[in-house]
Each structure stands twice: as C-alpha cells, then as structure tokens.
Image: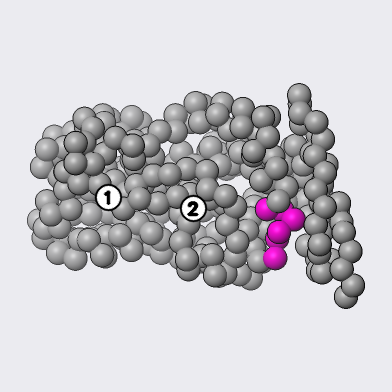
Amino acid sequence: MRKKPWLLAGLVLTGVAAWMIWNQQTDAKAHVIFEDHKLVVGTTGDYKPFTYWNEERNRYQGFDIDVIQAFAKAANLDVTFVKTTWPTLSEDTKSGKFDIAVGGITKKVEREVVGDFTSSYFSFQKAPLVKKKDVERLNSLAAINDPAVKIGVNPGGTNEAFVKKHFPKADVTVFENNLDIPKAVKSGQVDVMVTDDIEALHYATELDLAVPKLTEAWEPAEMAYLMKPDQKQLGDVFRVWIESAEGQEQVEQLKKKWNIVSTRETVGAKGAGAHE
C-alpha cells in the first residue's frame, strides 16, 4: 500500500491553538478512532483513586477516568468504557478489546510487548498500607517477610509480582477485588496491603490507616496508559494534548481534585514521617 500523509487530528482546546500533526500511515484501520469519533477505553474499576466503579451512580470514576474524558472532549471523541481485569489486561490489549486502557497501570516490558504505552504521567514506588498501630512494626521488607504477617494483594499485576519476590515467607491472601483489600486491613483480616504509594496514601486518608516510614526505598515504577498495537496516531494526538497548556492545566486540577500524591521523593534511607 503506498504511503501517504494523513492529518492526525485538530485539537480545539480552550485558550490553545488547534494542533495539526502529519504522519506516515500504512494501515487505514489506525484512523478509525478519529473518523468515527469513538474511543473505547478499558479499565479495571478497582484501583482508587485512579479508577473505580461507583455503584450508586452506575459509572466509572477516578483520576484516570477524568483525564481520558478530558482528552476525548478535546479530541471530539465519544468514550465507551469496557471492563478489563489485571490478569487479562495484556491479552485484552493484544486482542483489541479496547483502544486504550487506563487506571493506575504500571509500565513493564511484558505489557509493552502486547501494546504501546503513552508517555509516563506518574512516578511512584511500592508501599505498604497498615493500621496506625503498626507503622513502627511493619516498616521494612524484612519486617513484613514473616510468617506471622498477613498480606493482602490483588492478582495478575505488579503488586502480586512484588509480593512473590520480596515476601515469600509471609502469609499471603489474594483478593479478586482490589477494593476489598483496604477494608481487610481496616478490619484486621490482613496486616498489610502492598500497592503503589499513591493508592496507599489515598486509603490512609479515606479509612484512617497509615503508610509507614520505610527503612529502605521500595521498587520505583512509572504509570502510563496502554494502547492496543499500531495506535501511533492515538498516541501522538494524546501526547499533543497532555503536553499542551490546556492539557497540563486540566491534569494539575485533577491531581488536586483526587489528592494525587507520592512518597517517592521523600522515602528512602532518611525517610519521611509515617503518612496518616
């Protein structure tokens, strides 16, 4: 098929000039999103504050839900959300169940193989969520890697991989619904939830729990959105939007709305105080 330039998209942003990008494309299917003005978004709906299912309102909510909707509005796209899970995320991406997946997704090689990541939008590290009374006791890898310590973790993602790698001696319970784990910490069913520090800090506030001052830095990572294969056009248009003044302003406003914070800059040998 002879290559020819295509106009990717003109993003009309409040206070920002329209953007035009030209790209060499060989696959006409890559243009369906912007021709049909439809964007199918996959999300697990179980990872506060990034994505969760609000039963009362019968819809997905969260930071990433708001971000992708803001992008879609700027790009003149109608959004349809579809359910995915952490164990099936890679396969759902590869099969084209959705155009892009959002919701606290950690960048890792295994996922990059089946799809394409957008540029990273958050840096974070793994962290434990515990009761306030346990902030001094459960504040290191060694302290948590104990048969007497009960850990709750969700299946199929980087949290479970981290637990298997660092806590082989601990008593681990896998929860199918990630939203149930913070409640299990609160009730005493488990002692620790291992997750990213952003989610841990969210629940420390919401459920009156705590994120301990760690004696060492835990595994750093980055979050991004995961697109199905061959979606260069979507990735380019998203990058233009999120790097624009309008996009950056909206993202910063949403960070404040959802109280998005990370301990990565302050956790380490010197440590930060326990977050409660």
Residue hosting label 1? 218
The image position of residue 191, as x and y in percent, is 19, 47
User: Which of 52/226 is in front?
Assistant: 226
105 or 40, nearer to the observer: 105
> Tag 1: residue type?
Trp
Q: Quadrant of the N terminus?
A: bottom right
State left or right for residue 271 relative to residue 79.
Answer: left
Q: CA distance from mark 2 to mark 1?
A: 18 Å
Q: Which residues are magenta?
A: 230-235
Residue 173: quarter of image:
bottom left
Residue 208 visible in image:
yes
Going 39% across and 44% down the picture, which residue do you hit? 124
> In the rendered image, which quarter is residue 72 located in?
top right
Q: Earlier in the sequence, mark 2 or mark 1?
A: 2
**Residue corresponding to mark 2:** 105
Residue 241 image offset from top left, x and y in percent: 69, 39
